[in-house]
Amino acid sequence: MSLSRHLLRRVPSQSAVLRHFSTAPTTTVSESPSSQRIQHEFLPPNSYISSWKHPRNPKQAAAQLAFLRRDYDRKVKEMRKEYIKEMELQRIKKLRKDEARKEALRIANEERKAAKDAKKKAEAIERKAAEEEFRQMLMKERAEKLEYWRMREKKIQEKKKEKNELLRRQSSLWIGPSEVEKKTLDAICDYVRL
């Protein structure tokens, strides 16, 4: 828009143009510090500068002025078309860059999701293996405890059997119930005699 606004303004005077060219920098594009940036192509000098020659006839001046105006309008129209084309190309280029960036982001997101899913699957497999190992360890501990409990119960039963056997052997030396009264009476009588 600024270009079209600039073109629609009146043609600068010859002194302003000369002043502009006299104050323009003399360094070349390769010497300037901004040479790394986009290099700008300048348009060739305008044919309108110093093109007006004073005619002697006013009709001739009007015709020449009308020709200059038509030529200027035609050139402005062409420049506007070029500007519109450039803007359209820039817009298309920007759209393509945006689409490429979006596609790259989408692909990166898909890769990230795939990596996350693979990581989750690996963690699930590891967790399952750890749970299985823990379960096996628990089963082993339970089996060992059960075996220990059985051995302990067996030892307790054996001790009880041994104790009962010992008691039975000792009780064979004991006095039977029918003789208990007789033996107690004998013991009391012996005591009284003494």
Image (spheres, helix red, strand yellow):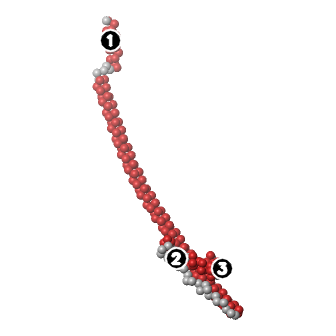
Q: Residues within 10 Å of mark 2 (few under 14, many from 20)?
A: few
> Image quarter for residue 114?
bottom left
For image coordinates 31% across by 19% down, the residue present is 175
Visible in this render: residue 74? no
Instruction: Determine whether the residue tagged by mark 3 lies in a helix, strand or loop.
Output: loop
Is 171 placed above or below 112 here?
Answer: above
Give the percent coordinates (x, y) of residue 17.
Answer: 60, 80
Identify the residue under disc 3.
9
Is 5 placed above or below 113 here?
Answer: below
Of the residues shown, which amino acid type is indicated by label 2?
Answer: Thr
Of the residues shown, which amino acid type is indicated by label 1?
Answer: Ala
Visible in this render: residue 28? yes
Mark 2 vs mark 1, foreground winner is: 2
C-beta proximity under 8 Å, tags 2 and 1: no
Left or right? Give the position of 46 relative to 104. Answer: right
Mark 1 vs mark 3, foreground winner is: 3
Identify the residue under disc 2.
26
Task: Indicate the quadrant containing the C terminus: top left, top right, bottom left or bottom right.
Answer: top left
Q: Nearer the viewer, residue 6 or 114?
A: 6
Pick whichever of labels 2 and 1 is earlier in the sequence. Answer: 2
Identify the residue under disc 1.
187
Left or right? Give the position of 79 relative to 158. Answer: right
